[in-house]
């Protein structure tokens, strides 16, 4: 019996590295190909705990992409620029949009040519595609063209979903809209790290967590809300959908959580480690004004999930507490 071949682009990012770790446990005989840009020197540490059969650069992948896509049974395309503040449209066009639709086209041609119904691809989209939420957070296709992302990153992801719909690929491709995903392997993300990371670092250095003041009269300081979800739960949902569904699906908690709740979860977890901790509200940077999402909440009604996979707010906050302690201990083990 031949080994299953699994291609993971962005395999050393937060979601990618956690996915490979899961695959190492669930698909022990699989041949795993990891594609990475190697633009960040922090990612080497993730390799210490992963089993990867073939590690290749983005440049190598572009040269061999037809061959690699042809032989891959499962493709998880998680590689992209994930910075919501990136303002170079040319960069985002090539890295997030063009690279993705070219990969999708190769996959579709290979799948149809070989009549391989078991060949699958997952594309990482984003909650940023929903913009300010005035058109809702539903992942049904009828609303797709009405969405208005607030930044170039969101546009680059949104255009891929539009492409899937217009080309008639939604029955053959799974596009997952990740909401605010957090986890341990975020060391490389710098200012794009989740509050689980930068919050802990701020406590260690300054004895405080800083949150942006609200410029929206509907939300008091700290009461801005996002849909947060731990990476482990997010991937369990994604892997289930990969087996049972296609099209566009939200992956989030399905419950809105305030920034205050996130911050106090971390502060309470670490108060026995650090004294005199504070929560401080600071002015929002000018470059975020008009591009900031005050409210996100994934509508999860399209995804019929088994009870054990349905996220719960309490569990998300418990995972945040657990991760923040791990990150704190990593810091003092000289890993950060």
Image: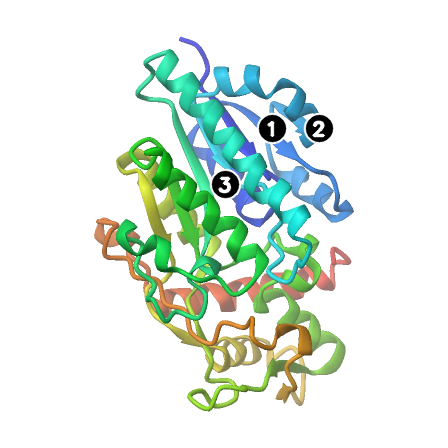
In three-dimensional space, the C-alpha distance between marks 1 and 3, rounded to whole angstroms, equals 12 Å
In three-dimensional space, the C-alpha distance between marks 2 and 3, rounded to whole angstroms, equals 22 Å
110 is higher (above) or lower (below) than 318: above
Q: Is residue 239 visible?
A: no
Query: Residue 227, labelled with which disc?
Result: none
- Tell which circle, 2 or 3, labels the residue nearer the N-terminal end: 3
330 is higher (above) or lower (below) than 304: below
Image quadrant of residue 41? top right
Q: Is residue 10 visible?
A: yes
Residue denoted by label 3: 19
Residue 111: horizontal and vertical position, in percent?
Answer: 38, 19
169 left or right of 302? Answer: right
- Marks 2 and 1 close (CB-CB < 8 Å): no
Image quadrant of residue 2? top left
- Describe the element under mark 3 as helix, strand or loop: helix
Residue 143: horizontal and vertical position, in percent?
Answer: 30, 56
- Describe the element under mark 1 as helix, strand or loop: loop
250 left or right of 148? Answer: left
Residue denoted by label 1: 52
In three-dimensional space, the C-alpha distance between marks 2 and 1, rounded to whole angstroms, equals 18 Å
Residue denoted by label 2: 59
**Callout 2 environment at 10 Å: few (<14), some (14 to 19), or many (20+)?**
few
Image quadrant of residue 96? top right
């Amino acid at each position: 019996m031949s080994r299953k071949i699994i291609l993971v682009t962005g395999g050393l990012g937060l979601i990618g590295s956690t996915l490979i770790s899961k695959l190492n446990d669930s698909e022990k005989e699989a041949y795993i190909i990891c594609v990475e840009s190697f633009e960040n020197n922090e990612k080497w540490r993730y390799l210490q705990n992963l089993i990867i059969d073939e590690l290749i650069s983005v440049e190598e992948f572009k040269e061999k992409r037809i061959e690699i896509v042809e032989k891959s049974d499962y493709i998880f395309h998680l590689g992209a620029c994930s910075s919501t503040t990136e303002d170079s449209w040319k960069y985002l066009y090539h890295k997030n949009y063009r690279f993705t639709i070219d990969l999708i086209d190769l996959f579709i041609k290979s799948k149809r040519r070989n009549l391989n119904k078991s060949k699958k691809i997952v594309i990482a989209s984003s909650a940023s595609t929903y913009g300010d939420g005035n058109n809702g957070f539903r992942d049904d296709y009828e609303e797709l063209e009405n969405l208005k992302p607030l930044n170039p990153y969101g546009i680059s992801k949104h255009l891929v979903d539009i492409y899937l719909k217009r080309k008639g690929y939604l029955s053959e491709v799974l596009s997952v809209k990740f909401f605010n995903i957090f986890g341990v392997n975020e060391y490389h993300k710098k200012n794009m790290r989740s509050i689980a990371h930068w919050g802990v670092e701020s406590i260690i250095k300054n004895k405080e967590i800083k949150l942006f003041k609200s410029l929206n009269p509907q939300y008091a300081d700290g009461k801005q809300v996002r849909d947060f979800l731990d990476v482990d739960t997010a991937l369990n949902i994604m892997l289930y959908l990969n087996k049972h569904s296609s099209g566009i699906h939200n992956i989030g908690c399905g419950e809105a959580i305030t920034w205050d709740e996130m911050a106090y979860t971390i502060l309470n977890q670490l108060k026995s480690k650090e004294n005199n901790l504070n929560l401080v509200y600071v002015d929002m940077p000018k470059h975020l004004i008009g591009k900031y999402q005050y409210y996100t909440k994934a509508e999860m009604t399209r995804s019929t999930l088994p009870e054990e996979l349905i996220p719960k707010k309490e569990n998300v906050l418990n995972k945040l507490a657990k991760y923040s302690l791990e990150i704190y201990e990593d810091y003092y083990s000289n890993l950060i």
